Image (spheres, grey):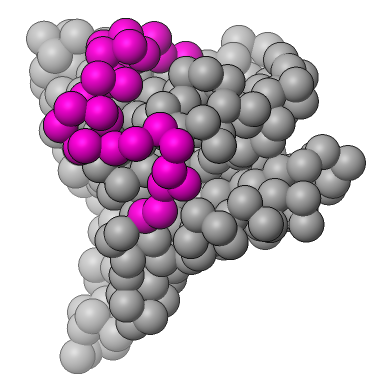
């Protein structure tokens, strides 16, 4: 939780001197979205909430015995959705707070929503930290909403100061964190689940084991989503988790099963006008994969990632932990071994 970059007295001086506010007044937001703009921004927010249908319902249920206003804003402080009880309803009506208004310091004075948007951190404003007297028996807490580490808005609660204890703060913080984890994992699953499954099929040589390891991979992604750094691509980070999941399994099992060639065929018949051409390409591909399966596991993996998935050396390094130079060496040796196997097979024919 941030300690504001300026101390509270400095913020109060800004409200009084720059914004010419009177602490005796009731602050009323002045900027407002049109109905069309509000609906458009809500649809963008629904992308976040679509994987978290019980998110707000859960929090409302937990705070139902506490006077409250729950607010969801976009990344510019526009109020898109709100929930409140009757006790808070009168104050909210007096302040002109409705869905579509924007929280700004020049209108609302010191408030947690605009501060959270400004600093992109959780912010708590309580009691006489507020500029306006009508809010000095209240406590407000706002926390950023993120999707794939991108700021998309804030989630906030206002209640009477005596009700804003650590348990309530932890409830809001943990609920928002879980909602972000669910939505980001869902997004990654939609984009990469098929690739992860194919990759694990290639490594394990067993469809059912690959399915189990794929589920374990995405569970690890859910639990470790906060460790994802934007410096690496989501794809290479996800492949690394899949790789580590396979390594853990392989160390326990120490055995490989028959390769399922149909999982790795890169061609479909509709790509060819002549059926016999498709059959020829498919046969050649299956034959190459059969030879690849005779290589040691590290060689198989580096060929799969480079030749089948067309990952760059850096992406392979990100997902396996191998250095670029080691990858180039392994790839060179793997290709040579594969070439020898294919040549020997051709001589026998």
- 282 vs 68: above or below: below
Predominant SS along the magenta part: loop
The answer to which image quadrant residue 303 occupies is: top left
- 3 vs 124: above or below: above
Whether residue 78 is visible here, answered yes or no, is no
As drawn, is 193 to the left or to the right of 349?
right
- 31 vs 155: above or below: below
Is 8 magenta? The answer is yes
- Say which residue appears at 19% left-offset and 9% top-offset: 323
- Residue 177 image offset from top left, x and y in percent: 57, 31
Magenta stretch? 1-29
Farthest right residue in view: 65
As drawn, is 72 to the left or to the right of 102?
right
Whether residue 96 is visible here, answered yes or no, is yes
- Residue 271 image offset from top left, x and y in percent: 23, 80
The answer to which image quadrant residue 199 occupies is: top left
- Say which residue appears at 52% left-offset and 42% top-offset: 155
- 273 vs 166: above or below: below
Residue in the foreground of this view, choosing between 268 and 127: 127
Residue in the foreground of this view, choosing between 268 and 315: 315
- Say which residue appears at 61% left-offset and 38% top-offset: 157
- Say which residue appears at 18% left-offset and 27% top-offset: 17
Farthest bottom residue in view: 273
Q: How many marks?
A: 0
- Residue 146 image offset from top left, x and y in percent: 41, 39
- Residue 31 image offset from top left, x and y in percent: 28, 61
Is 196 magenta? The answer is no
Residue in the foreground of this view, choosing between 293 and 266: 266
């Amino acid at each position: 939780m941030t300690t504001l970059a300026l101390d509270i007295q400095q913020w109060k001086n800004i409200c009084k001197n720059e914004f010419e506010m009177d602490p005796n007044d009731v602050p009323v937001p002045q900027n407002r979205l049109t109905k069309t703009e509000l609906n458009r921004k809500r649809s963008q927010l629904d992308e976040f909430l679509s994987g978290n249908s019980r998110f707000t319902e859960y929090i409302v249920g937990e705070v139902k015995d506490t006077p409250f206003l729950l607010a969801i804003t976009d990344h510019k402080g526009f109020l898109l959705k709100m929930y409140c009880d009757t006790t808070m309803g009168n104050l909210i009506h007096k302040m002109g707070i409705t869905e579509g208004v924007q929280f700004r310091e020049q209108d609302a004075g010191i408030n947690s929503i605009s501060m959270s948007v400004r600093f992109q951190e959780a912010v708590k404003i309580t009691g006489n930290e507020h500029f306006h007297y009508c809010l000095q028996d209240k406590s407000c807490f706002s926390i950023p909403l993120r999707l794939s580490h991108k700021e998309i808005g804030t989630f906030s609660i206002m209640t009477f100061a005596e009700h804003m204890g650590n348990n309530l703060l932890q409830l809001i913080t943990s609920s928002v964190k879980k909602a972000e984890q669910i939505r980001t994992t869902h997004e990654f699953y939609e984009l990469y689940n098929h690739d992860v499954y194919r990759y694990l099929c290639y490594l394990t040589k067993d469809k059912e084991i690959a399915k189990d390891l794929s589920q374990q991979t995405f569970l690890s992604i859910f639990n470790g989503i906060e460790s994802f750094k934007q410096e690496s691509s989501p794809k290479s980070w996800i492949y690394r988790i899949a790789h580590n999941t396979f390594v853990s399994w392989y160390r326990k099992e120490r055995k490989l099963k028959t390769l399922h060639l149909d999982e790795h065929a890169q061609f479909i018949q509709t790509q060819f006008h002549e059926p016999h051409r498709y059959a020829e390409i498919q046969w050649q591909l299956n034959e190459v994969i059969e030879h690849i399966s005779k290589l040691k596991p590290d060689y198989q993996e580096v060929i799969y990632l480079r030749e089948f998935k067309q990952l760059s050396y850096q992406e392979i390094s990100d997902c396996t932990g191998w250095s670029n130079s080691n990858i180039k060496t392994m790839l060179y040796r793997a290709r040579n071994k594969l070439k020898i196997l294919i040549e020997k097979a051709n001589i026998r024919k």
